[in-house]
């Protein structure tokens, strides 16, 4: 399988370097010295995608980022990625992202990809685009491994309306939720917890979310969401529950975390700091440390503080 991964990575890099040259699956296969049938089999085993799907999704994802971050016109973006007309590009974009590029460029809705594989694809590719285009600077990030004992997450508000992260925190601030949570004494951390759906009734939550999606896709509801964001604070396991009667209590068992921290300074902005921490996690070689990510049943956390910077706690378990 390692050899298959090498072939796949070689092919992906070749496609990425030549994406503006209207590359085809046949050309990629020839470059990798395989027949199209052979390479498609290898590529599908390692990625779950055919070469044609990967090329198509990569083109549209790069076009999405160009719409979001560049000043290019829609027609220029269409031609850049090999579409014969703006109309052809619009049809392809809308089929995958559920809205047309003009509407996205004007209002910057959160796109709703047609399946979770495309959602992950966007997530994995966006930071590469940042680096290539110089949108933000990669800052120094420290990382370490800790074990947290049993404790309690005190949820002041959950993101039940599937708002964007920035909008959710903005609403918490506006509605006094942040101040209410910070008024609780003797807390460990305050910030966001990404709660696995396993914590709740998974079937019930997914039905609720699907109803939201079906009701109005233009509001940015995601096709799939594995975690639900909560704003709140963390306290010790024996904290007096009578002080927490106005909040939702979520008990979290002892768990191990890889922690990433990026400091703020006068020369950096919050976007640089946050993106640097997240991308340090993406680049972290978890298996070489004898660990694997453990998102399914344990929340992961984020905090942003002007003194300590931005910190992420990602749950892991031993291999």
Image (cartoon, grey):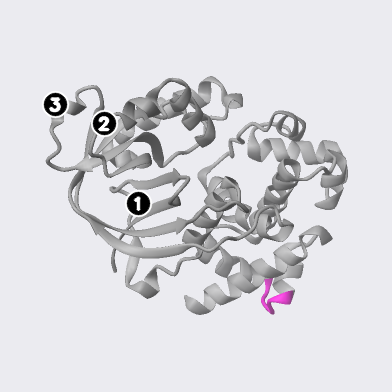
Query: Residue drawn at (24%, 59%), measured in percent from left and top?
Result: 147
The answer to which of marks 1 and 3 sits earlier in the sequence is: 3
Q: Seen in the image, is 44 located left or right of residue 176?
A: right
Q: Residue 295 carries which label?
A: 1
Q: Does the magenta stretch include residue 297?
A: no
Q: Which mark is residue 184?
A: 2
Looking at the picture, does residue 17 appear above or below residue 120? Answer: below
Question: Which residue, given by chain and number where applicable, does mark 3 sit on?
Answer: 242
Residue 2 location (% of width, % of height): 48, 77
Looking at the picture, does residue 209 appear above or below residue 190? Answer: above
Q: From the viewer's perspective, is the residue at label 1 or at label 3 nearer? A: 3
Q: Seen in the image, is 120 located left or right of residue 39?
A: left
Find residue 133 and report its image quarter. bottom right
Residue 72 location (% of width, % of height): 83, 44
The answer to which of marks 3 and 2 sits earlier in the sequence is: 2
Residue 125 location (% of width, % of height): 61, 55
Stretch in magenta: 31-35
Callout 1 crowding tier (Cα within 10 Å): few <14, some 14–19, many ≥20: some
Q: Nearer the viewer, residue 32 or 225?
A: 225
Q: Seen in the image, is 54 located left or right of residue 203?
A: right
Q: Which of 79 and 137 is in front in this view?
A: 137
């Amino acid at each position: 399988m390692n050899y298959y991964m090498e072939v796949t990575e070689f092919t992906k890099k070749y496609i990425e370097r030549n994406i503006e040259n209207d590359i085809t699956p046949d050309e990629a296969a020839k470059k990798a010295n395989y027949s199209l049938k052979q390479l498609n089999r290898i590529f599908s085993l390692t990625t779950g995608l055919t070469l044609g799907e990967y090329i198509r999704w990569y083109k549209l994802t790069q076009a999405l980022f160009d719409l979001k971050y560049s000043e290019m016109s829609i027609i220029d973006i269409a031609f850049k990625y090999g579409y014969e007309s703006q109309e052809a590009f619009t049809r392809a974009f809308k089929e995958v992202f559920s809205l047309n590029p003009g509407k996205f460029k004007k209002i910057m809705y959160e796109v709703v990809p047609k399946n979770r594989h495309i959602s992950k694809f966007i997530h994995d590719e966006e930071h590469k685009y940042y680096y290539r285009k110089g949108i933000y600077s990669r800052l120094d990030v420290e990382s370490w491994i800790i074990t947290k004992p049993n404790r309690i997450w005190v949820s002041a508000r959950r993101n039940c309306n599937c708002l964007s992260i920035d909008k959710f925190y903005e609403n918490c601030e506006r509605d006094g939720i942040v101040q209410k949570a910070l008024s609780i004494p003797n807390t460990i951390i305050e910030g966001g917890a990404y709660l696995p759906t396993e914590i709740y009734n998974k079937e019930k939550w997914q039905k609720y979310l699907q109803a939201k999606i079906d009701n109005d896709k233009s509001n940015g509801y995601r096709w799939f969401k594995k975690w639900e964001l909560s704003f709140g604070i963390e306290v010790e396991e024996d904290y007096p529950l009578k002080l927490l009667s106005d909040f939702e209590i979520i008990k979290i068992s002892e768990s191990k975390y890889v922690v990433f921290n990026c400091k703020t300074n006068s020369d950096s902005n919050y976007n640089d700091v946050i993106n640097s921490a997240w991308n340090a996690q993406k680049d972290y070689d978890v298996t070489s440390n004898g660990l694997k990510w453990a998102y399914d049943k344990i929340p992961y956390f984020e905090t942003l503080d002007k003194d300590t910077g931005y910190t992420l706690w990602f749950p892991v378990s031993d291999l």
